[in-house]
Image (cartoon, rainbow, N blue to C red):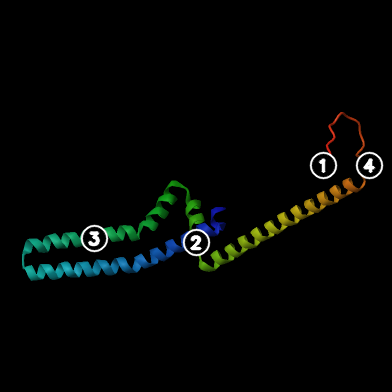
Protein backbone atom coordinates (compact mmCIF):
# COMPACT_ATOMS: atom_id res chain seq x y z
CA UNK A 1 0.00 0.00 0.00
CA UNK A 2 1.27 3.44 -0.93
CA UNK A 3 -0.32 4.95 2.15
CA UNK A 4 1.65 2.65 4.45
CA UNK A 5 4.94 4.15 3.28
CA UNK A 6 3.92 7.72 4.16
CA UNK A 7 5.47 8.59 7.50
CA UNK A 8 2.73 11.12 8.30
CA UNK A 9 0.06 8.41 8.08
CA UNK A 10 2.17 5.94 10.05
CA UNK A 11 2.78 8.57 12.74
CA UNK A 12 -0.99 8.99 13.08
CA UNK A 13 -1.34 5.21 13.33
CA UNK A 14 1.29 5.14 16.09
CA UNK A 15 -0.86 7.60 18.06
CA UNK A 16 -3.96 5.50 17.38
CA UNK A 17 -2.13 2.42 18.67
CA UNK A 18 -1.15 4.29 21.84
CA UNK A 19 -4.74 5.43 22.29
CA UNK A 20 -6.04 1.88 21.84
CA UNK A 21 -3.50 0.44 24.30
CA UNK A 22 -4.38 3.06 26.90
CA UNK A 23 -8.09 2.44 26.30
CA UNK A 24 -7.66 -1.31 26.79
CA UNK A 25 -6.32 -0.61 30.26
CA UNK A 26 -8.35 2.41 31.34
CA UNK A 27 -11.84 1.36 30.17
CA UNK A 28 -12.02 -1.87 32.23
CA UNK A 29 -10.62 -0.07 35.28
CA UNK A 30 -13.26 2.67 34.94
CA UNK A 31 -15.93 0.01 34.46
CA UNK A 32 -14.86 -1.74 37.67
CA UNK A 33 -14.68 1.47 39.67
CA UNK A 34 -18.09 2.70 38.51
CA UNK A 35 -19.64 -0.75 39.05
CA UNK A 36 -18.16 -0.96 42.55
CA UNK A 37 -19.47 2.53 43.36
CA UNK A 38 -22.96 1.62 42.10
CA UNK A 39 -22.88 -1.63 44.12
CA UNK A 40 -21.84 0.31 47.23
CA UNK A 41 -24.71 2.81 46.73
CA UNK A 42 -27.22 -0.04 46.34
CA UNK A 43 -25.96 -1.76 49.49
CA UNK A 44 -26.20 1.47 51.45
CA UNK A 45 -29.72 2.28 50.23
CA UNK A 46 -31.06 -1.24 50.89
CA UNK A 47 -33.77 -1.01 48.20
CA UNK A 48 -34.36 -4.05 45.99
CA UNK A 49 -35.55 -1.95 43.03
CA UNK A 50 -32.29 -0.04 43.02
CA UNK A 51 -30.33 -3.29 43.02
CA UNK A 52 -32.14 -4.53 39.88
CA UNK A 53 -31.73 -1.21 38.06
CA UNK A 54 -28.05 -0.91 38.92
CA UNK A 55 -27.37 -4.55 37.98
CA UNK A 56 -29.06 -3.99 34.61
CA UNK A 57 -27.08 -0.78 34.07
CA UNK A 58 -23.83 -2.59 34.96
CA UNK A 59 -24.67 -5.41 32.50
CA UNK A 60 -25.32 -2.83 29.74
CA UNK A 61 -21.97 -1.20 30.42
CA UNK A 62 -20.16 -4.54 30.26
CA UNK A 63 -21.87 -5.36 26.95
CA UNK A 64 -20.92 -1.98 25.49
CA UNK A 65 -17.28 -2.40 26.51
CA UNK A 66 -17.16 -5.94 25.11
CA UNK A 67 -18.61 -4.77 21.79
CA UNK A 68 -16.06 -1.98 21.56
CA UNK A 69 -13.15 -4.27 22.42
CA UNK A 70 -14.29 -6.99 20.01
CA UNK A 71 -14.90 -4.58 17.14
CA UNK A 72 -11.67 -5.56 15.29
CA UNK A 73 -12.74 -9.22 15.40
CA UNK A 74 -16.16 -8.31 14.06
CA UNK A 75 -14.56 -6.37 11.20
CA UNK A 76 -12.23 -9.25 10.35
CA UNK A 77 -15.08 -11.74 10.31
CA UNK A 78 -17.23 -9.40 8.19
CA UNK A 79 -14.50 -8.91 5.58
CA UNK A 80 -13.96 -12.68 5.41
CA UNK A 81 -17.67 -13.19 4.83
CA UNK A 82 -17.86 -10.70 1.98
CA UNK A 83 -14.69 -12.04 0.40
CA UNK A 84 -12.41 -9.02 0.87
CA UNK A 85 -9.96 -10.63 3.23
CA UNK A 86 -7.03 -8.90 1.49
CA UNK A 87 -8.28 -5.55 2.84
CA UNK A 88 -7.79 -6.72 6.41
CA UNK A 89 -4.41 -8.27 5.55
CA UNK A 90 -3.24 -4.94 4.08
CA UNK A 91 -4.66 -3.03 7.04
CA UNK A 92 -2.93 -5.38 9.49
CA UNK A 93 0.38 -5.03 7.63
CA UNK A 94 0.01 -1.27 7.70
CA UNK A 95 -0.95 -1.30 11.39
CA UNK A 96 2.03 -3.52 12.20
CA UNK A 97 4.36 -1.22 10.25
CA UNK A 98 3.29 1.72 12.40
CA UNK A 99 6.16 1.76 14.88
CA UNK A 100 8.28 4.64 16.08
CA UNK A 101 11.40 3.17 14.45
CA UNK A 102 9.71 2.79 11.06
CA UNK A 103 8.34 6.32 11.25
CA UNK A 104 11.79 7.71 12.11
CA UNK A 105 13.42 5.75 9.27
CA UNK A 106 10.82 6.89 6.73
CA UNK A 107 11.08 10.49 7.96
CA UNK A 108 14.88 10.51 7.58
CA UNK A 109 14.59 8.87 4.14
CA UNK A 110 12.08 11.50 3.02
CA UNK A 111 14.31 14.25 4.41
CA UNK A 112 17.34 12.89 2.55
CA UNK A 113 15.33 12.62 -0.67
CA UNK A 114 14.17 16.21 -0.26
CA UNK A 115 17.75 17.39 0.36
CA UNK A 116 19.01 15.51 -2.69
CA UNK A 117 16.22 16.96 -4.79
CA UNK A 118 17.04 20.48 -3.61
CA UNK A 119 20.75 19.93 -4.20
CA UNK A 120 20.18 18.61 -7.72
CA UNK A 121 17.81 21.50 -8.48
CA UNK A 122 20.39 23.95 -7.13
CA UNK A 123 23.12 22.35 -9.23
CA UNK A 124 20.92 22.53 -12.33
CA UNK A 125 20.15 26.17 -11.64
CA UNK A 126 23.82 26.98 -11.02
CA UNK A 127 24.84 25.24 -14.24
CA UNK A 128 22.23 27.15 -16.25
CA UNK A 129 23.29 30.42 -14.63
CA UNK A 130 26.95 29.78 -15.39
CA UNK A 131 26.07 28.90 -18.98
CA UNK A 132 24.09 32.11 -19.40
CA UNK A 133 26.92 34.15 -17.90
CA UNK A 134 29.36 32.54 -20.32
CA UNK A 135 27.08 33.12 -23.32
CA UNK A 136 26.47 36.74 -22.29
CA UNK A 137 30.18 37.40 -21.83
CA UNK A 138 30.92 35.89 -25.25
CA UNK A 139 28.22 38.01 -26.84
CA UNK A 140 29.56 41.27 -25.35
CA UNK A 141 33.22 40.74 -26.19
CA UNK A 142 32.63 39.75 -29.79
CA UNK A 143 30.26 42.61 -30.47
CA UNK A 144 31.08 44.84 -33.46
CA UNK A 145 28.41 47.43 -32.90
CA UNK A 146 29.53 51.01 -33.37
CA UNK A 147 28.19 54.23 -31.95
CA UNK A 148 28.18 56.00 -35.31
CA UNK A 149 25.01 56.38 -37.18
CA UNK A 150 22.87 58.87 -38.94
CA UNK A 151 19.68 60.44 -37.81
CA UNK A 152 18.08 63.73 -37.00
CA UNK A 153 18.56 63.86 -33.29
CA UNK A 154 18.85 67.06 -31.30
CA UNK A 155 22.27 67.64 -29.87
CA UNK A 156 22.50 69.08 -26.40
CA UNK A 157 25.60 70.44 -24.77
CA UNK A 158 25.76 70.22 -21.06
CA UNK A 159 28.00 72.52 -19.07
SS at mark 2? helix
Sequence-wise first label, 2 or 3: 2
- Identify the disc placed on residue 61: 3
**Are circles 1 and 4 on residues that touch, CB within 8 Å?**
no
- Identify the disc placed on residue 52: none
Q: Residue 63: x percent and y percent?
A: 26, 59
Dot 2: within a 10 Å radius of its alpha carbon, few (fewer than 14), some, or many (20 or more) residues? some
Q: Residue 109: x percent and y percent?
A: 62, 63
Count of picture labels: 4
- Identify the disc placed on residue 158: 1
Q: CA distance from mark 2 to mark 4?
A: 65 Å
Which marked residue is nearer to the observer: mark 2 or mark 4? 4
The residue that disc 4 covers is 144
Q: Residue 53: x percent and y percent?
A: 13, 59
The residue that disc 2 covers is 11
Which marked residue is nearer to the observer: mark 1 or mark 4? 1
Dot 1: within a 10 Å radius of its alpha carbon, few (fewer than 14), some, or many (20 or more) residues? few
Which marked residue is nearer to the observer: mark 3 or mark 4? 4
Image check: 132 left or right of 57? right
Q: CA distance from mark 1 to mark 2?
A: 74 Å
Sequence-wise first label, 1 or 2: 2
- Report the residue at 12% width, 68% height from top: 41
The quarter of the image holding the C terminus is top right
Q: CA distance from mark 3 to mark 4?
A: 95 Å
Sequence-wise first label, 1 or 3: 3
**Are circles 1 and 2 on residues that touch, CB within 8 Å?**
no
- Report the residue at 21% width, 67% height from top: 34
Which marked residue is nearer to the observer: mark 1 or mark 3? 1
Sequence-wise first label, 1 or 4: 4
The part of the image, by quadrant, that contains residue 112 is: bottom right
Sequence-wise first label, 2 or 4: 2
Amino acid sequence: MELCTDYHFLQALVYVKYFINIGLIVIPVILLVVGSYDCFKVLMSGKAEDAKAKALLFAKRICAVLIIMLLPEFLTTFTKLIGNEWIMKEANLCFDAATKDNVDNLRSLALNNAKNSINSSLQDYTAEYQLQLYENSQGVSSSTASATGSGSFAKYELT
